[in-house]
Amino acid sequence: YEKYHKILADTFPKLNIFFDNYGHTDNAENHHRTLQIVNTLIDNGHIYAKEIETPFCDTCGRSQPDRFVRGECPYCGKDARGDECDQGCGRYIEPGLILNPRCAVCYNPTRPITRKHQFLKLSAFEEFIGDFLKNVDGTKNARNFALGWVKEGLRDWCITRDLDWGIKFPGDDSLVLYVWVDAPIGYMSSTEQWAKTIGKPKEWEKFWKPGDGRLVHYIGLDIVQHHCIFWPAMLKGSDYNLPFAIVASGMVKIEGHNFSRGRGYVVWVQEDYLDRGLDPDYLRYYIASYTSQTKDLDFSWDAFADKVNNELVATLGNFLYRAIHFTHKNFGEVPEGKLDSKLKKELETAITTITAAVNEYELKKVADEILRIAAVGNEYFQSQQPWKLIKEDKEKTGEVLFNALALSKALAIFIEPFLPSAAETIWAQLGNEAATIHESLLDDALNPPEVGTKITKPKPVISKIDEDLLAELKQIISDRVAAASAAQSGEVELKLAPIKDTISFDDFQKVDLRAGKILTCEKVPKKDRLLLLEVDIGTETRTIVTGLADQYKPEELTGMTALFLVNLEPKKIGGIESHGMIIAIEKGDEPGRWLPVKVDGVPPGSKAA
């Protein structure tokens, strides 16, 4: 998780997305708050133990939690994860319900075994959840989906899993809490962290203890059940504040497939977008403005380019550049003028429309209104023809440009949430300190710029998407989706390494491969890819360094018996002398993915031949 948390923490600022606190769930605050809530639920009689059937993988030799199992969704028949139909209906799947289960690690079928787990009495909250959903604010899709499940009758929820990592269930260290128990509690613990950083450690209670605090959850449609049913029940059962609103977005798709990093249906923000020099503002605008909050967005580079070229450049950018450029060229400052009554009414209408759209959680309506005002600006500028008027009446021209700049200022304020970098640039061109745009309020759009303010020489703030770049981006996605679809259908083109040169039998005889049990495993400080292993090879314990840190957590390798090359000449790796090498196989259908050769059931030191 640390790897991906770092990637996200590094990427969000590049997209001009900033948080008051960006935490994760594996921290002291979340462990403490999770255990406090679970213990309260236990004390209030909401949790009980029950034996159920769970998947066991004979090949891996362990019970597999549902995230390590794949099969067919019992509701829609699509290929699904053990706990969620991620490519079909999006429903939560209780442990043991998935059809034709197979291990996601070794791909072999699993078999059911009986195991005691812990359950939340969700059925006891059915009436409460129904009433909550009828009154909660947010989007209709979240309410309607969840109410449909309530009408079917809520079943008690298994809240524990068989895993080596996670928050231990109180009183039973053999079980950990399901990730969707502690994950939403992370909202609460992150607020606690924020409160500490501002020096007011009790400030979090304003939001989470019963009172006037308003909690608004923005989620994807695939986790409606978790936020509309499980989470409110947990909060109610432990005496915390309930969400004021739950806003569920449609799914982001690519050529009809739900985005999925694991399956390969994905567009990478860094590699595909930022590394090619594309402006973060464009992506923000495309996603926010393309469709209604509740509808799916089928990602398309053509649609992206159309948004940039025909809306941002041709409508918005065109007006802003013309207004500021003509003023700078002919006046150099904000000229004398008075806000035209018709334009003022247009801005008042825009503020009303934008406010209503935000309260309806519909960002597309905000974007549509921004474009409408930009079109009003273009029409006004074109109808007044200042390039002709300047030759006849400079004072009248100044009044026209005063109004054009008033619209430009309003547009800078309107676009700031979508296009923060462009808004800063426009704000600076209008003679302001760039960063102060972020302090502006919506009603400030009615206040024209101050007469006499110096106008800086403008430059276009938005550029068209290059046709060659567009073609390249489309080809990359087309190839990626084709490869992902082939992998899902089993028609994978294997990228296998060539066979190496022949060696003699005597050379082979020199190789000593033995089973080794990994006693301990830890990360090598300041080396992102290296793990330090202490390995029992039967005759002694060896220190071995391996480059698998980007693929395995230390706890995933600890206790594993794997195949090792034990007569390799010692070599310093990352400043540590390594006395051997773990044997791993690179997956032919997933280059760069290495799987240690496990040899369970044999004692350390057993020789391979």
Image (cartoon, rainbow, N blue to C red):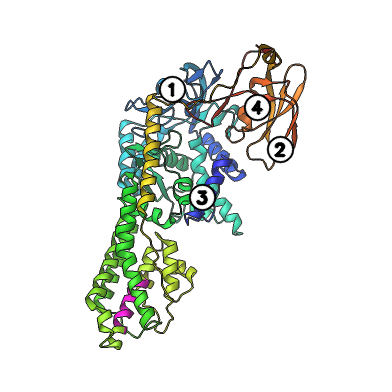
- Please state if 102 lies on the left or on the right of 286 as rendered: right
C-alpha gap between disc 3 and disc 1: 37 Å
C-alpha gap between disc 1 and disc 4: 27 Å
For label 4, the residue is 558
On the image, the x and y values in percent for residue 123 come to 39, 32
Residue 526 position (above or below residue 66): below
Question: Neighbour class for label 1 at 10 Å: few (<14), some, many (≥20)?
Answer: some
For label 3, the residue is 11
Q: Which of marks 4 and 2 is nearer the N terminus?
A: 4
| The magenta stretch spans residue 387 | no
Closer mark to the observer between disc 1 and disc 4: 4
Q: Is residue 585 or residue 109 the one in the foreground?
A: 585
For label 1, the residue is 96
Q: Earlier in the sequence, mark 1 or mark 2?
A: 1
For label 2, the residue is 574
Q: Which of marks 1 and 4 is nearer the N terminus?
A: 1
